[in-house]
Amino acid sequence: MELDKNKLLIKQLPPTIYIKNFIDGHPANYEDFLTTFINSSKLVTCKGNQAFILRKHEEQNHGEADIFNSFYDLDFKIMVDTKYMEARRMLSPAITEFCPGVVGKGPSRLKGERKVYDIIKCFRSMNIDDLIKIEKGLIKLPEGKTIIQVLKKVSVNKNMLLFLPYDYCFENTSTNAEAAKFIIDCISEDLQCLLEYRHLKVCKDIYLSFISKECFVIAQEKDNVLHYYDMIKTSQSNLYTYLYETGKA
């Protein structure tokens, strides 16, 4: 099948995946399964050949990165409008785990709609000059606050893994390396100005990740372009599998 950007699907993941402790009775954080995925990737062999350790939140009081080994550290940043996360938390059906294997669903906390912005679309038509002007308040846009949120995230002086909490895929096509590379090219084109902005602010590594069907895909930035880095089966993380299966409609 010939891959076509116009046929690329962007599906919402269940809120259980990216909202901390969404399931009442089953505390969970996306940082846990991201650590598992990273430890299943070639990043381990390329960065000291040691597994990464996830720092507890109380150990991050001085701005330490989320995961580390004796050779390298990496910080996780979720790439989504904070209003989107708030809306998904309040408007999605509530989920309670009564005991292992016994789960119940109830009505959402609120009814209605919320206006949110797609991070990728926010940057798609921008250039680096636009971003600098938005940062300085010289350009006012409805999505300006969302853009500034992201600019602040990528300006942090750390090696960073950005996580797009969506499923990027093609209908009736399994995700192999070819499809993953094509999807990465599409995302890279849309985020080029953001990658340029990051280079203006920080001279450290940046990776981007997303879900594609049963795979966790990692891209690495080089010269303001995202390149395929690795791909891991999501089944490597029991936590991810549980959160996905429990949260899906």
Image (cartoon, rainbow, N blue to C red):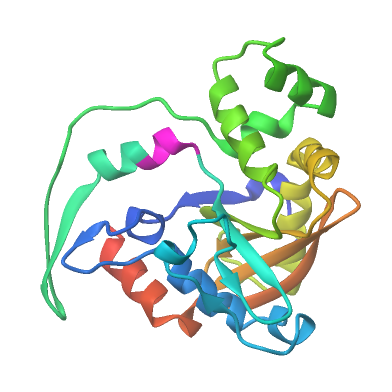
Whether the magenta-drawn stretch holds residue 249 is answered as no
Q: Residue at x 54, y 56 (%)?
A: 62
Residue 188 in the image: x percent, y percent?
77, 48
Above or below, comparing residue 24 to residue 11 in the picture: below
Can you say whether 36 is above or below 158 in the image? below
Quarter of image, res 216: bottom right
Q: Is residue 132 visible?
A: yes
Residue extent of the magenta highlight: 81-85
Q: Which secondary structure type mostly characterizes the magenta part of the structure?
A: helix
From the viewer's perspective, tell me whether residue 168 is left or right of residue 28. Answer: right
Give the residue at x 80% y 36%: 193
Where is residue 201 drawn, in percent x and y? 79, 40
Of the pair 157 and 4, the residue shown nearer to us: 157
Seen at 32% across and 67% down, the residue is 28
Instruction: Where is residue 183? Give x, y as percent.
Output: 71, 56
Position of residue 30 in the picture relative to residue 21 (left or right): right
- Residue 233 seen in the current view: no
Determine the residue positioned at 22% across, 69% down: 26
Judging depth in this view, the residue of 114 and 42 nearest the camera is 42
> Left of 94 or right of it: where is 139?
right
Is 82 a magenta residue? yes
The number of discs equals 0
